[in-house]
Image (spheres, rainbow, N blue to C red):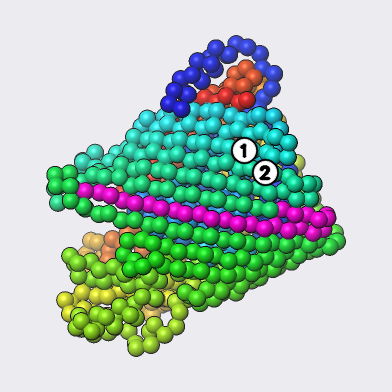
């Protein structure tokens, strides 16, 4: 696909002066149907939960390449790179580790340190993205503590061959090539896609000898088959493969080192649908996935290994779901089993984390006025404490234009396998980090070797299982929709308890500590979200969104009340007692975020233009005055605004050309926002067939 962009350019300009017969980029009215919130098809407007839908047309107009590109423009979602550079999503002020990421309703794996890298998900064959905010463990179990993002891919549906071929080139020689197509043969429909991406990377800090982001390239392919046995049953089989190679160059102790990081991901997903009548439906699902990443970096002069790490996670999940409709009520139930294991550096052996679960849901509608949604799920696991997750939601429709909704849900995040089975000793420094489940035996071994000076925890510290982190989330919303205006307000409150954190459990004879994990403390996030869209004319539409957020640690609040927290005046160097108003909150949170979008189409010119803006207020990443909290006397990352724009021109019947500029004002912040590379320009050409 190397020369696709040049061929398409020539074809596009050759066809420029010819008449157009059909406009494929025009927006069409579709029923806004979502499946993530209830695991059954539901009209978006009737749901009692805060749900957001991103359509394929919206994705296409923005010119987004990866999942993180489109999510960062949505209200209440912030893309945050962790300290390893992995891009995760912060939702309602909750960390990336608390948001479950699904593709076609099944989870992605590969959280090496909590975050799931969103940049590895291409959006070239996405039909729509569904975002459910608030605790959703009653349906989805672990990691849905803060919410769920479900990426729904295109499904086979056409008998004749249809598809698209496009190529894009931009700043830093970033190239993206896509081929999507589908067709049908008798009872079989086929849909396939392939995406190749590469970039030379970029450097934000010119004073050092290392790039901020090194060159990398990846390939994503997906094949989906839909065989219809009859009007009542069909089988959908989908296979997805992802491969990425990153170049690595670094300097350690004035010595150059280089190597590669290789990533492979494979997903296989089969679904059998059987609907014996209009009231009853069965879904049998089988899902298998593997995520594998390996680093091999060596010193250039000696070829000796600097680090050679690996991470290999497998998940196998069968599940059965049954839905039964009776008048105004839908009953949904399901059960399944997770076969999960992980091999990685610093694990003595393969870690096994199997569990089974079952869930029930009651969905009641009364005269199109009231919708009651109640759910309950039970997760049983031998590696950590079992969890029961309830949820209750209500929607009241006063009129076609005005409705209110409220929900309360229980969420949980299971301890990850690193927190349970890690076994790491830093030979150079001398400290040890142990997972909760391996710590007792390892402590006994170290004790017999005479390496432990004294214990820092009680003898029964490891008697019970490590508990999952849990939350209770509340959402209350108001919607006001008219023909050309849509407005919504959602007020939310989340409290997360049993936070899992590291703590010293013993002191070694060399003076260093042994660390493990335990449940400590609680945090809360609260605020409101406002969304509005207005169709000014038939061809002009604007939308905007705003989130106000407060996110704080309950223990810090109590310590301030008890007069235990101090700060130092940067001018006088005098210590003083902090007030509640001095406490800013959790790290990497902004009190204010907002977005604005403007879409224009000029039918006579076959021209489409959009302008988007994303705002984030100040936030803190580091405790710069050394009192272990983020207060108003610390150093903060400054507020910023990102402006993006693109213009699309339809040429003849089958060609489109798009020009775009992302980050128009050339914003960069090496220390606090390394995911922004500065101003990016690009050109994309597409052929529809």
Is 298 one of the magenta-colored residues?
yes
Q: Is residue 195 left or right of residue 587?
A: right
Q: Callout 1: few (<14), some (14-19), or many (20+) C-alpha neighbours within 10 Å?
A: many
Residue 20 circle label = none
**x 57%, y 41%: residue:** 223
In the displayed structure, 567 sits above or below 127; it is below
Q: In the rendered image, which quarter contains the C terminus? A: top right
- Across and down, in percent, residue 519 comes to 43, 76
Q: Callout 2: few (<14), some (14-19), or many (20+) C-alpha neighbours within 10 Å?
A: many
Is 486 or 89 nearer to us in this picture?
A: 89
Q: Is residue 464 left or right of residue 29?
A: left
Q: Earlier in the sequence, mark 2 or mark 1?
A: 1
* Residue 330 occupies quadrant: bottom right
Is 306 or 376 nearer to us in this picture?
A: 306
Judging by the rendered image, the residue that carries numbered circle 2 is 226
Magenta residues span 273-299
- Across and down, in percent, residue 449 comes to 20, 81
Judging by the rendered image, the residue that carries numbered circle 1 is 191
- Name the chief secondary structure element in magenta: strand
Whether residue 458 is visible to the viewer of this picture, yes or no, is: yes
**x 76%, y 57%: residue:** 281
- Across and down, in percent, residue 508 comes to 21, 78
- Residues at marks 2 and 1, CA–CA distance in whole angstroms: 9 Å
**x 14%, y 51%: residue:** 253
In the displayed structure, 84 sits above or below 194; it is below
Q: Is residue 17 left or right of residue 1?
A: right
Whether residue 64 is visible to the viewer of this picture, yes or no, is: no
**x 29%, y 83%: residue:** 444
- Across and down, in percent, residue 214 comes to 31, 41
Confirm or deny contact between disc 2 and disc 1 (CB under 8 A).
yes
* Residue 390 occupies quadrant: bottom right
């Amino acid at each position: 696909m190397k020369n696709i962009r040049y061929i398409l350019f020539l074809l596009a300009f050759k066809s420029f002066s010819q008449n157009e017969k059909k406009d494929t980029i025009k927006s069409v009215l579709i029923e806004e149907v979502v499946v993530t919130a209830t695991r059954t098809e539901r009209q978006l407007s009737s749901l009692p939960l805060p749900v957001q839908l991103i359509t394929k047309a919206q994705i296409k107009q923005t010119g987004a390449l990866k999942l993180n590109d489109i999510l960062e423009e949505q209200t209440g979602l912030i893309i945050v790179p962790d300290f390893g550079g992995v891009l995760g999503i912060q939702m309602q002020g909750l960390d990336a580790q608390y948001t479950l990421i699904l593709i076609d309703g099944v989870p992605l794996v590969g959280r090496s340190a909590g975050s799931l890298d969103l940049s590895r998900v291409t959006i070239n064959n996405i039909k729509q993205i569904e975002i459910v905010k608030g605790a959703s463990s009653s349906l989805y179990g672990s990691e849905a503590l803060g919410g769920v993002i479900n990426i729904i891919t295109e499904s086979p549906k056409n008998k004749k061959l249809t598809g698209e071929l496009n190529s894009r080139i931009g700043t830093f020689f970033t190239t993206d090539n896509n081929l999507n197509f589908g067709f049908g043969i008798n009872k079989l429909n086929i849909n396939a896609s392939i995406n190749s991406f590469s970039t030379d990377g970029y450097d934000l800090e010119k004073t050092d000898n290392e790039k901020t982001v090194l060159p990398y390239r990846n390939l994503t392919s997906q094949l989906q088959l839909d065989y219809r046995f009859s009007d009542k049953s069909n089988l959908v089989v989908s296979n997805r493969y992802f491969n990425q190679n990153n170049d690595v160059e670094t300097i350690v102790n004035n010595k150059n080192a280089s190597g590669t990081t290789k990533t492979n991901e494979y997903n296989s997903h089969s679904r059998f649908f059987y609907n014996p009548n209009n009231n009853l439906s069965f879904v049998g699902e089988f899902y298998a996935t593997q995520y594998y990443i390996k680093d091999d970096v060596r010193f250039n002069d000696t070829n000796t290994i600097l680090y050679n790490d690996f991470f290999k996670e497998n998940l196998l999940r069968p599940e059965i779901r049954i839905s039964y409709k009776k008048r105004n009520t839908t009953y949904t139930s399901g059960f399944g089993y997770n076969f999960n294991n992980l091999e990685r550096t610093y694990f003595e052996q393969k870690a096994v984390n199997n569990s089974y679960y079952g869930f029930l849901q009651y969905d009641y509608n009364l005269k199109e006025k009231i919708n009651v949604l109640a759910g309950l799920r039970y997760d049983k696991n031998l590696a950590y404490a079992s969890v029961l997750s309830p949820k209750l939601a209500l929607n009241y429709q006063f009129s076609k234009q005005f409705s209110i909704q409220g929900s309360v849900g229980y969420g949980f995040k299971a301890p990850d396998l690193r927190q349970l089975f890690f076994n790491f000793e830093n030979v150079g420094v001398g400290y040890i980090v142990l997972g909760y489940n391996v710590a007792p035996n390892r402590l006994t071994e170290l004790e017999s070797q005479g390496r432990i000076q004294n214990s820092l925890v009680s003898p029964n510290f490891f008697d019970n299982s490590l508990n999952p982190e849990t939350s209770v989330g509340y959402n209350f919303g108001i919607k006001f929709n008219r023909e050309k205006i849509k407005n919504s307000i959602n007020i939310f409150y989340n409290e997360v308890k049993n936070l899992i954190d590291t703590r010293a459990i013993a002191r070694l004879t060399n003076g260093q500590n042994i660390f493990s994990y335990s449940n400590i403390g609680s945090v809360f996030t609260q605020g409101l979200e406002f969304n509005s869209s207005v169709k000014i004319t038939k061809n002009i539409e604007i939308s905007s969104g705003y989130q106000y957020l407060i996110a704080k640690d309950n223990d810090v609040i109590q310590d301030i009340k008890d007069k235990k927290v101090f700060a130092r005046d940067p001018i006088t160097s005098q210590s003083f007692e902090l007030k509640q108003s001095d406490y800013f909150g959790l790290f990497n949170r902004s009190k204010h975020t907002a977005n604005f979008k403007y879409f224009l189409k000029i039918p006579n010119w076959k021209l489409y233009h959009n302008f988007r803006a994303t705002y984030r207020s100040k936030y803190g990443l580091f405790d710069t005055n050394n009192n272990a909290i983020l207060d108003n006397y610390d150093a903060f990352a400054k507020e910023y605004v990102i402006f993006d724009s693109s213009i699309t021109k339809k040429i003849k019947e089958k060609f489109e050309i798009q020009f775009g500029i992302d980050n128009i004002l050339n914003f960069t912040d090496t220390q606090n926002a390394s995911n922004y590379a500065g101003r990016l320009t690009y050109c994309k050409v597409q052929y529809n067939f």
